[in-house]
Image (cartoon, helix red, strand yellow):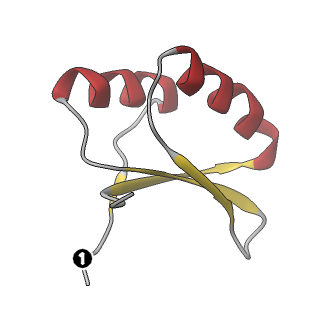
Amino acid sequence: MNKSFIFEVEWKHAYQIRNQLLANSLPCFMVSTSEGKVEFSFPDLLHRQYNQVRKIFGEDGLKRKRK
C-alpha cells in the first residue's frame, strides 16, 4: 500500500478508531511508534472517504513525504 497520509493517536484511542475505520470499510495500515503511539497510514482516498477519515479523527492527516 502506498502511504499518502498519516494520523498518530494515543493507544487508548486506537481500538475505537480502528473499529470505526473497519465499519466504514476504509483501508489503513497500523503501526506502533517508538513514542508509544499508534500511527494509522492511509493510501490516496476518494474525497468522500477522506472526509469520513477526517470525521473519525477530528482533524486533517499529516502528509507523508514521498521518497
Residue plotted at (34% across, 42% down): 60
As shown in the figure, which amino acid type bears the numbered disc 1?
A: Arg
The quadrant in which residue 53 appears is: top left
Determine the image quadrant of residue 5. Answer: bottom left
Is residue 64 shown above or below 7? below
- Estimate the x, y position of residue 36 in percent, counting from the top left: 78, 65
Looking at the figure, which quarter contains the C terminus? bottom left
Identify the residue under disc 1: 66
Q: Is residue 23 above or below residue 34?
A: above
User: Horizontal and vertical percent for residue 10?
Assistant: 72, 49
Q: Nearer the viewer, residue 59 or 39?
A: 39
Query: Measuring 76% from the left and 33% from the top, which residue is drawn there?
Result: 15
Question: In this image, 37 relative to 29: left or right?
Answer: right
Seen from the viewer's position, the closer of residues 33 and 22 is 22
Left of 47 or right of it: where is 16? Answer: right
Q: Where is residue 57 in the image (x, y as percent from the top left)?
A: 50, 32
Label 1 Cα neighbours within 10 Å, binned few <14 / some 14-19 / many ≥20? few
Horizontally, is 41 left or right of 65 in the view? right
Residue at the image point whose x is 65% and y is 32% from the top: 18
Residue with the most extreme top position? 23
